[in-house]
Structure formats: structure tokens, C-alpha cells
């Protein structure tokens, strides 16, 4: 159940960012946003930990800011795989990843306000 809620939250975050900043992310339909959220969840579960481990020295030197680059690259990868979900270049992916994370965090705190307790 938690996975489905996270999937819906990420889908809504993608749709919100695509609506607010259409020059960064374009989504053709809610189904494309759902598939993008699903693929992004799979990529973040399996590929991201490997990339974080491989780039750990660079992440430590940049005080963790390189993680933003990894998030942007993964969002860009998802846009290359999912039809109907487009990100405008690496800078767009970087900005989009940051904005999606912020909106997803806000939506998660609204849906599960006392999850940590």
C-alpha cells in the first residue's frame, strides 16, 4: 500500500511541475506521468544506490551536492525511456529533480503528517 501511495504522490508531483514549469518538463497525459513515476521509483530503488556507492568519493568532496547531479541524471534517463514524458536537457533534469523532490516531500507530509511517530 505504501508503494502505491508513493507512486501516486510522485505522479502528482510530476504533473504539478509539468504544469508550473512547462519549459523544464512536459507530460502528455496522466498515464505518462504514472509510468514515469513508476520507472523513476524502480530506477531510484535499484540504480541510484549503485551510483551513489560508485561516486561516494566525489559526493564526499562536494559535501553531498553531487547527489543532485545523480538525481538529475536519473530523471533524464527516465525521460529517455518513457514515451510522453520529456525533460529539456540535463539542466532541465537537474531543476526538475529538485522541484519534484520538494513537491513530493510537501505532498508526503500532507498525506502522512505523523509517519515518523
Image: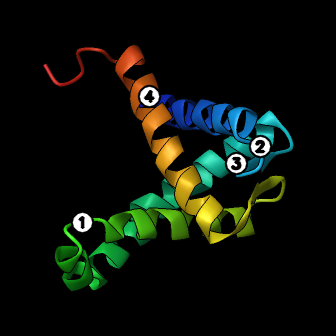
Name the foreground residue: 53 vs 38: 53
The nearer-to-camera label among 3 and 1 is 1
Mark 2 vs 4: CB contact within 8 A: no
Q: Earlier in the sequence, mark 2 or mark 3?
A: 2
Q: CA distance from mark 3 to mark 1?
A: 29 Å
Q: Which residue is mark 3?
A: 35
Q: In the rendered view, does 112 fall on the left or right side of 14?
A: left
Question: Considering only order in the chain, which callout, 4 or 3, is on the residue closer to the N terminus?
Answer: 4
Residue 55 versus residue 9 in the image, above or below: below
Ranked by sequence position, the earlier of labels 2 and 1 is: 2
Count the marks. 4
Label of residue 1 in the image: 4
Where residue 64 appears, as percent x and y from the top left, is 24, 66
Residue 14 placement, left or right of 115: right
Q: Which quadrant is the C terminus positioned in?
A: top left
Label 1: how many Cα within 10 Å (few below 14, some 14–19, many 20+): few
Q: Secondary structure at mark 1?
A: loop
- SS of the residue at dot 4? loop
Amino acid at each position: 500500500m505504501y508503494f502505491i501511495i508513493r507512486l501516486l504522490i510522485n505522479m502528482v508531483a510530476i504533473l504539478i511541475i509539468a504544469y508550473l514549469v512547462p519549459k523544464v518538463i512536459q507530460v502528455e497525459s496522466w498515464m505518462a506521468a504514472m509510468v514515469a513515476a513508476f520507472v523513476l521509483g524502480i530506477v531510484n530503488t535499484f540504480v541510484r544506490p549503485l551510483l551513489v556507492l560508485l561516486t561516494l568519493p566525489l559526493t564526499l568532496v562536494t559535501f553531498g551536492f553531487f547527489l543532485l547531479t545523480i538525481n538529475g541524471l536519473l530523471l533524464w534517463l527516465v525521460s529517455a525511456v518513457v514515451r510522453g514524458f520529456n525533460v529539456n536537457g540535463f539542466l532541465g533534469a537537474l531543476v526538475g529533480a529538485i522541484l519534484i523532490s520538494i513537491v513530493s516531500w510537501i505532498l508526503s507530509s500532507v498525506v502522512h503528517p505523523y509517519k515518523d511517530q
